[in-house]
């Protein structure tokens, strides 16, 4: 690896010296999967009172329930002990401040890259997108009816979760 990663490798050396999680398995001890955004202000384990090994954390831009998230949830449910899913977007999300067209235009204008073949799954109406994503999980034919699905918006300025009901 290049020197661009030296800080991470050094930090990992410190981490590995006191590593005490070798006994963890791939199972979600608390039966939970969390779908959340890649935003670096979100520490899903800490904000939900969880520890390593408690939950499966699925992250992407905007906390969207995409085909890949659904595929991953099928595996998490049937192979890794997940029996409940929390979809958790957040306030002040860049994906909730523009449309796919806006993002394509910005990247094209600033970087000269044509991204029109990609779907960014922006969320101009975050509440509607969250509800739609919850329904998408609940009605996905490969997931069991018994799967508990919840939604909440995480406020990055207060640390509070704001539950959303269908």
Image (tube, rainbow, N blue to C red):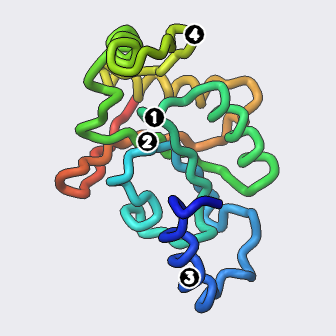
The quarter in which the C terminus is drawn is top left
Q: Name the residue under label 3.
A: 15
- For label 1, the crowd category at 10 Å Cα-Cα, with few meaning under 14, some 14 to 19 and many 20 or more, is some
Find the distance from the CA under tag 2 to the CA under tag 1.
5 Å
Q: Mark 1 points at which residue?
A: 61
Which residue is tagged 4? 117
Whether label 2 touches label 1, CB < 8 Å? yes
Q: SS of the residue at dot 4? A: loop
CA separation in Å, label 1 and label 4:
17 Å
Residue at position x 52%, y 24% from top?
A: 135
| Position of residue 55 measured from the top left corner of the image (x, y, whole percent) | 59, 60
**Residue lying at 48% horizontally and 21% vertically, measured from the top left:** 120
Residue 125: name its quadrant.
Answer: top left
C-alpha separation, residue under disc 4 versus residue under disc 3: 40 Å
Which residue is at the front of the view, 143 or 73?
A: 73
Give the residue at mark 2. 37
Residue 94: image x %, image y %? 30, 32
Identify the mark nearer the N-term, 3 or 1. 3
Residue reaching furthest to the front: 3
- Marks 3, 2: nearer the viewer: 3
- Of marks 4 and 2, the one in the foreground: 4
């Amino acid at each position: 690896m290049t020197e661009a990663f030296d800080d991470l490798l050094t930090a990992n050396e410190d981490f590995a010296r006191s590593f005490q999680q070798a006994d963890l398995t791939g199972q979600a001890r608390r039966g939970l999967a969390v779908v959340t955004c890649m935003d670096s202000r979100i520490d899903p384990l800490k904000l939900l009172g969880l520890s390593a090994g408690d939950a499966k954390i699925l992250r992407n831009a905007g906390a969207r329930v995409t085909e890949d998230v659904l595929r991953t949830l099928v595996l998490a449910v049937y192979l890794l002990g997940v029996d409940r899913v929390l979809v958790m977007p957040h306030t002040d999300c860049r994906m909730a401040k523009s449309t796919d067209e806006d993002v394509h235009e910005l990247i094209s204008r600033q970087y000269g890259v044509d991204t029109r073949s990609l779907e960014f799954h922006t969320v101009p109406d975050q509440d509607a997108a969250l509800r739609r994503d919850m329904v998408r999980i609940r009605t996905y034919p490969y997931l069991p009816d018994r799967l508990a699905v919840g939604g909440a918006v995480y406020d990055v300025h207060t640390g509070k979760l704001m539950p959303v009901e269908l």
